[in-house]
Amino acid sequence: MKMYDYKKHCCIASALLLMLVGLSLNAQQLPSKLDNPISKTYLRNNLRKASPRLVLNKEIEENLKQKLKSDPVVQNVYKSLKNGAAAVFEKPIINLDIPLEERSQNNQLDISRDLLHRIGMLAMVYRIEKEVKVLNRINEELIAACNFPTWNPKHFLDVGEMSLGIALAVDWVGEYLPASTVKLAKNALIEKGIKPSWPENGKAPKWAYGNNNWNQVCNGGMVAAAIVVAEEEPELASKTIYRAIDGMQNALNQYGPDGVYPEGATYWRYGTSFTVVTAAMFESAFGSDFGILEYPGFKESALFRVLSDSPMGLFYNYGDCGESSGSNGDATLAWFASKTGNKTFFEKEKFLKPYDKEKKFSRLLAPALVWIAQYEEKSETTVPAAWAGNGPNPVVFFTGGEDDPNKFYFGGKGGRGNISHGNMDAGSFVFELDGVRWSVDLGKNKHYGVIERTGFNLWERCQDCERWKLINKNNFGHSTLSVNDQLHRVDGKASIVEFKDGAFPEAILDMSPVFEGQLKSATRRFKKSGPRSLLIEDDIVLSEDTDRITWQLITQADVEIVEGGAILTQDGKRLKIENLSHPEFSLSVISLSPPPFYLDLKKDNLKRLELRIPTWTIEGMDTKISVQLSGE
């Protein structure tokens, strides 16, 4: 009989175990890192010596000037910048005495943004035209802004945007300005920009290593300031740039794994715009973006941004996002177009629209002109008709494709309430058909400042915080489920656990963590059940504490309750809502116009359509709610 070789088999088993562990580790998404070689020595040896070196440099500017002679898109965008610069002369010099508008917050952010907007236009126009009048105005704006007592470091976004504006002015036109102005500006960048970013207690400010748009904006402004003053303050400059690259990774990690920006499409524009400007500054100044473009999920986020824009020109406006995608070309998206050559990311028709002085274009349009000029078409990616992305705030999209006569558009989401700009909206969705948005997301409150000045705490995100009193922040103002008329669990995250592509795609969300203590488990299934229909199915397992389940749809349509559901009517179109699973219960309509709380967002004809199911009517401990929306 052959003896069992214990030692031999132990060795084989150990080897297999190590191999499996190794495969498991390789399969995990290990933390990514940007290249970060920054030191005083690196700056001395690698920083471009001559200005311009922020976004522009000698070679990049030569390409821009050539494109201005031949490219109609570049010509039209430059015309917009030139007309915008001319409009600056109709305004007083930048100052702190500008009265607060209704929308303004109690900070200097609007002023910093105005300065960045003015400088971008004026400085770009001066580099092209060399008109003395423009240079003199830049000089006046710089002196005024640099003489502000502070740039309001307690709200560091103000400092970040101001620093970028001042740095661009010094870099792009400093050689033409009076030496005294350049000295004043560099000193302001050091004393009012960079130094306040290094607290005396030695601790890094929250934004430096945060995971939201503050990280991107503030670090971007500090990078611009540090590059401009690198010769005067090499130690301060090097440690500031090093910290920025080190900290930016935390914000970039939020794009992973698939490109979903947790704060939504509007804030994608904001945060991402400063990251791409930072990448452009690194490239022009050092010849490398240190890995920003290829950071996992970052490049893919351009597709997320495209998918967030519906056939109606409306964003899937979850979180604190605005609804309209705007009529101007997307300057941030154009950077991705310049890097990939992908026509899908280049909004050519919008960039060719005539200048309209009533519509304020991006304050980063001057830097964007550079990458608009760098764009060379190499490919066109077909936008998928179904796409799902996981991450901190998972999102799924179904569309009818580019030439869909039905204009079918669906965006649904998971996530959790306590992320930056988050809402209790897990399981919610928007739905468009026939050019009508039937299920709406309320998006952001019109004016943050109006709410803040009442003393209302808009920004804390604990379970019992004031934020959830607002109808657009809590689950009662979203097309989702509510249980026992209670708030969602603010830290409970709904994840996409299944996604199927094809002609009739579907996605399943695990909603169980959202209803911890209210339900035993819950999943929500979205399915495009036909070219003109959407099916929502909720599989629910009750707990002993479950009293009632409410299925909700938020709409601005007129509602007619009919047997087995309802008929929605809006803009001459009709949508049928079929209560497939519980026809014994009628839908009901709750008016949200006016809304329940005086600080709530107000929308005409807003209402919540409800299907309320008492648990005593359910046999056993589980039930399925099935509702179909279909166009007539």
Image: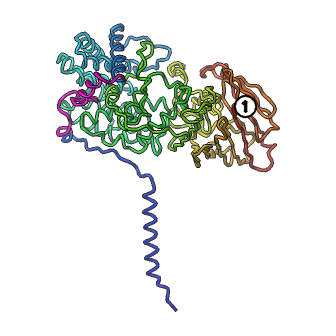
Residue 54 located within the stretch drawn in magenta: yes
Magenta stretch holds residue 300: no
Q: Residue furthest bottom?
A: 1
Closest to the observer, 584 or 444: 584
Residue lying at 68% horizontally and 49% vertically, measured from the top left: 520
Residue situated in front as seen by the camera: 47 or 155:
47
Circle 1 sits on which residue? 576
Span shown in magenta: 43-72
Q: Residue 449 in the image: state x and y as whole percent.
A: 50, 20
490 or 371, nearer to the observer: 371
Circle 1 Cα neighbour tier, 10 Å, few/some/many (<14 / 14–19 / ≥20): some
Q: Is residue 513 visible?
A: no
> Would residue 205 appear left or right of 603 to someone viewing this image?
left
Q: In the displayed structure, does residue 404 sit left or right of residue 570?
A: left
Q: What type of secondary structure mainly makes up the magenta span?
A: helix
Q: Position of residue 500 (x, y in %)?
A: 59, 47
Give whichever of 430, 187 is nearer the camera: 430
